[in-house]
Image (cartoon, helix red, strand yellow):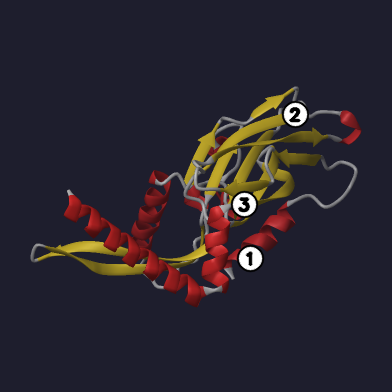
Amino acid sequence: MRKAAALLLAVSALPLGGAEAPELVPDVSQRDVEIQYSFTGADLLLFGAIVYPDGRRPEKPADIVVVLKGPEQSIVMREKQKVAGIWVNADTARFRSAPSFYAMASSRPIDRIVDERTAAIYELGVDKLQLSPSSLNDSAELSRFESGLVALRERSGLFVERPGTVEISDGVLYRARLPLSARVIVGDYTAETFLVQNGRVVAAAVRDITVRKSGFEQFMASAAEHWSFLYGLAAIALAVGMGWAAGAIAKRI
């Protein structure tokens, strides 16, 4: 419900059609990212142009915010506590729709571009993500778990913020680079671009990106999904064979 409400607010915040509304013409350097055994991440270039009515640019330069998002996941966070010298699971929190990957770049710091409400509507910043918690009611406890989730994903390179890195040339051409972590999951990603004038999002555009496995990784994933029984037998046979080989080598040393 929170996602649906935010989407409705975002749509209503954009200007309705008309000759006075600028448009975005975005693109991305890679729309198909392949994950192989040697995949160490990717550096995506998000670029495009701002088309103003009659070619007239506003006196005050506009701002650009680009957001790269991965598939949403349901996540369970567990907090560890030390009891009698042993670390055990204590409190838990479940988030229904946390993005598996989130990266954002902007032409200026977000708090200098839009207000808190607009940033929350469009999820501009990791602290504005709508994670949809389903198991907590206490606001302080919820904030603690949300901060923990963000910190973990930032350390893994799955949540990235790069304010002030979007380059805008002649007021119409823009470009930004965002890293795609080696830990990303396969699925459909979106590259969103927002044009902001006077604190309002006046145009938005989306490009789709597909992250998929290829080569041997794709074969193994397909085998595990479609021939799970044979895949399990092969995995057991391989483990037994490697164990036998290691034992035979150890005897000869």
Q: Contact (CB < 8 A) between labels 2 and 1?
A: no
Mark 1, other Cα within 10 Å: few <14 / some 14–19 / many ≥20: few
Q: Circle 1 sits in a helix, a strand or a loop, which is it?
A: helix
Locate residue 74, reporting x and y percent: 48, 67
Residue 142 sits in quarter = bottom left
Q: Nearer the viewer, mark 2 or mark 1?
A: 2
- For mark 3, give the secondary structure: helix
* Residue reaching furthest to the left: 84
Residue for badge 2: 173
Residue at mark 3 to residue at mark 1: CA–CA distance: 11 Å
Identify whether 135 is placed above or below 85.
below
Instruction: Determine which of the numbered discs, if any, sits on residue 252 in the image.
Output: none
Q: Which residue is mark 1?
A: 5
In the image, is 244 to the left or to the right of 237? Answer: left
Q: CA distance from mark 2 to mark 1?
A: 32 Å
- The residue that appears at 91% across and 32% down in the rendered structure is 54
| Distance (Cα) linking label 2 and label 3 | 22 Å
Q: Report if residue 173 is visible in the image.
A: yes
Amino acid under label 3?
Answer: Tyr
Q: Which residue is at a point 88% across and 30% down the rendered structure image?
A: 55
Q: How many marks?
A: 3
* Nearer to us in this view, 130 or 176: 176
Residue at the disc numbered 3: 122
Q: Secondary structure at mark 2?
A: strand
Q: Split into 4 quadrants, where in the image is the N terminus? A: bottom right
The residue positioned 75% from the left and 35% from the top of the image is: 48
Q: Nearer the viewer, mark 2 or mark 3?
A: 2
